[in-house]
Amino acid sequence: MRHAGGSAADDWPQNHVSPGGNGSLRVPERLAIGATTAPPQAQPGAQATTTVPPVQPQPTTPGPIPPVTPAPAPVPVARRRPRLYIIDATRLFAAIFVALHHYAGTLRVNEAHNPIWGRPVSHIMPSIFRVSAYGWIGVEIFFVISGFVICMSCWDRRPRDFFVSRVIRLYPAYWFGVLFTTGVLTLWPKVWKPLPARDVIYNLSMLQEGTHHADVDGVYWTLYSELRFYLLFLIVVATGLTYRKVVIFCCVWAVVAAFAPAANLPVVTLIANSNGVWYFIAGLTLYLMHRFGPDLLLWGMLGFTWVMSQDEISSRITHVEHVSSWRGALTIYTVFLLFMVAVALGKTDRLQWKWLATAGSLTYPFYLLHYAAGTTAIYYLRDRMDARVLVAGLIAVFLLASYGVHRLVERPLSKIIKRGLNNAFDNLGKHSHS
């Protein structure tokens, strides 16, 4: 590894380095004490002069030798890691996989006389149905990436910065999604009924899942899981992130989640976050591998999350999805986890396609907009075009709409909110003792 501060002066003996200044000066090895200049020789023809005897050198006592400041040790240069554009690409893949599942792979769309397609989608697109039946795994992929990215983005940052970044990331697009979806369902209520105004207003808080209010859009349940993770991790951020603290956080959270079913206490269940805990911990562990390198402890933590997540996957298939197999779902998740190990170990660092950053920014608005509005559009358009073209076209339309939301809603509104929150935190600091 190369070091900063290295120069030719580093080869000089330490007691021959003159501290201060940019360079280093060589000092003679020995300095003759009391040396004199020889008397000048008389020139021929010069008058005699009185010879002055040479001055005898006075004995001197050497003074104390000043301490020599050693040269500073070279400081290692932190290697700047390239942006992980592959994470943006993975986000986009997960979002499209989820949308494909909602349009052509859920139990709802495969029922006879379902309100979306009118008949089982497995009869309309059998091949696509078999693939999209596993698209719900995209949510688990989101959770793992979230754990990785959150840990990466808030390292060496203040708690207020973490809080502000989460607010401006979550809420502007979400508020638009709530209002947009409510508008669509109010105008075209054939598939989904719009919620009462009081529930729509409460949805703006993003806390409806915890208070048993209905979601404006069924996919919003994942946001409550994300929100609980952020609030828990904020405790660690407030103390200053270190390798040790993140490991302890993961282990304590895992213990709580493992024993939550037996405890049967609402507070413990809330903290346990059983729908996402093993995926968030996997993401945090993968980031520690990325930042500090893998070791046996991290491999063990990642393996434990895999063991526990396979049970969560089985439970979700049994109680919610019903259309996919445990073995197939676990295989897909395992392949994804191995892929993320490769990302964490730097095997994908050479992928530097900058356009993927823009693609990744579309993921969140796309997720918020695609489901209720998209399935409503299927109802009205299913008899007017080929089903495969309709699904592909809807994905393209909502990606384009998401770009508009990102540019026209998220970015300007985020700037305003960020400025306001930073001013508010500054005021808290100024008036903390008044």
Image (spheres, helix red, strand yellow):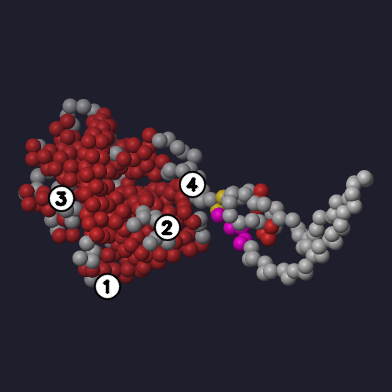
> Looking at numbered disc 2 in the image, what kind of residue is underneath it?
Thr
**Whole-number angstrom distance, CA of label 2 to CA of label 3:** 32 Å
* Residue visible at 20% across and 37% down in the picture: 374
Q: Earlier in the sequence, mark 2 or mark 3?
A: 3
What are the residue bounds of the magenta stretch? Answer: 69-75
Front residue of 177 and 301:
177
**Whole-number angstrom distance, CA of label 2 to CA of label 1:** 26 Å
Identify whether 146 is placed above or below 399: below
Where, by quadrant of the figure, is residue 100 drawn?
top left
Q: How many marks?
A: 4
Q: Is residue 373 visible?
A: yes
Q: Earlier in the sequence, mark 1 or mark 3?
A: 3
In the image, taking residue 17 as reference, residue 184 lies left or right, namely left
* Residue visible at 16% across and 53% down in the picture: 205
Q: Is residue 327 visible?
A: no
Front residue of 130 and 433:
433
Mark 1, residue position: 263
Q: Nearer the viewer, mark 2 or mark 1?
A: 2
Can you give x and y, in whole percent of width and height, for residue 107 in the image? 23, 46
Can you give x and y, in whole percent of width and height, for residue 2 in the image? 59, 49
* Residue visible at 48% across and 46% down in the picture: 81
**Whole-number angstrom distance, CA of label 1 to CA of label 3:** 32 Å
Where, by quadrant of the figure, is residue 407 drawn?
top left
Mark 4, residue position: 80
